[in-house]
Amino acid sequence: MSASSSLRELLDSLSKEQRCNQELLTSLGFALRSFTNLSRFLELVPVVASRLVGVKGALLVPFLADGTLWREQLQVLPLARNQDLIRHLALFEAGKRLGFGSDEEQVLAMDRLVQRHMSGAGIFSTSLVARGRQRGRLYVFDPRGELVWSDVHRRHLQLVADLTGVAIENDLILQDARRHEHVDRQLSIGAEIQAQLLPDSCPVIEGVELAARCRPAFQVGGDYYDFMPTRPDLVGRRREKGRWALVMGDVMGKGVPAGLLMTMLRGMLRAEVLSGLPPDRILHDLNQLAQEDLSHSHRFVTLFYSDFDPRSRRLRYANAAHNPPLLWRAEQRSISRLDAPGLLIGLQAEADYGCGHVILEPGDVLLYYTDGVTEASGIAGDRFDEVRLLRILDEACRSGKGAQEILDQLFVRLDRFIGLDHQLEDDASMVVLKVNDALMLPTLKGSWPDN
């Protein structure tokens, strides 16, 4: 055979090898773009890596997001001869520790473990890196001895490792996106639940004005307020003159579970209202009814319960550790708190609650609110707090505003405090009840001229 013929055959062989390698890399790239199942992609990696460098063995050791060994995805070729190695890697104690993949010494210890099981074999290894984080290790080996290695082999293997790192990183991003999508769905469901809990509008109650609003935070909370007639069978003017229950509550916690628990409590409470019992007995019974469900969920509820009789303007109330409502007295032009002793709903099976009462006078204003108002963070990092709320409520009441105007002013000042571009950390709910001002009859002039 002539020298020129031998050279042509060598060039043909090299060209054929190059085409084969290009096809392998193209196949791996296609798999990366097309596979929605990461496991199937990872199974291909040892096959492509070993063929690219012309050896019989390859090992892929991927890491989970927390840096631990991904034992379920250990891939080796050929499997039959290397099952013992896979078993030892799965039992490798250091690989079970969080952050193992970013600890260089521990990764080197794993390299030595692989080398011991490949005694006499030629081994080359490289890291799977994506976005600056190590996502695993890729090994190729030749059981016959030293590897016949070239710079082309090195580049090809690193390309496979890089593609594998990208595949793992893409899967982590996809999982994270799915988690966010799941959370968004939960928040949407929770928002619907919460919206259904709250009354569409305030009822008409003789002698008073009512205004209410819940300002949801980014996350769904457990705020709840309600207005319930103690005699739902009454209609029209008779219902307006009848006794009404006014409630403000908050489930400790956020999200759909809090909304679901409040839905359950709302149903229980509405049934209790029909009993006609005083507020302290209603909270006592509600606590016992909800005890088991709340203890299983490891959540508790604060709740202020009151009932109002328009004929006498008498307000009775009991408190299960909720923020005490603020009462602005028109005659004294001063504010006091309506509070009564009582534990959180769900904290203790046998809990007693105190009962207070007050007669509301013309012009008086009562503000129910949740801690999302006073705990709201301002631009400077401080809290809105009760002192600021007291001052703003006093200003609004002294101006002679109606219930809706008072509520609007409170929320305007709250929004200004937290900043227009900032989000509440928790739901902020307020209900304003204002007793109608006393009717002032006009002074009548005498019919006869003065003499």
Image (cartoon, grey):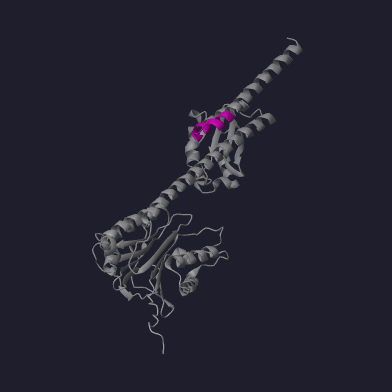
User: Which quadrant: the N terminus?
Assistant: top right
Residue 223 in picture, x, y percent from top left:
40, 60
Residue 55 in picture, x, y percent from top left:
60, 26
Question: Vertical placement of 451 versus 82: above or below?
Answer: below
Question: Vertical placement of 148 versus 132: above or below?
Answer: above
Quarter residue 138 falls in: top right
Q: Main secondary structure of the magenta part?
A: helix
Going by the picture, which residue comes out furthest to the right? 3
272 sits left or right of 165 in the view: left
Does residue 402 appear anywhere in the picture?
yes
User: Which quadrant: the C terminus?
Assistant: bottom left
Q: Which residues are magenta?
A: 28-42
Seen at 63% across and 25% down, the residue is 22
Does residue 63 appear anywhere in the picture?
no
Seen at 26% across and 64% down, the residue is 238
Whether 356 is among the magenta residues is no
151 sits left or right of 434 in the view: right
Residue 135 in picture, x, y percent from top left:
57, 41
Quarter residue 29 falls in: top right
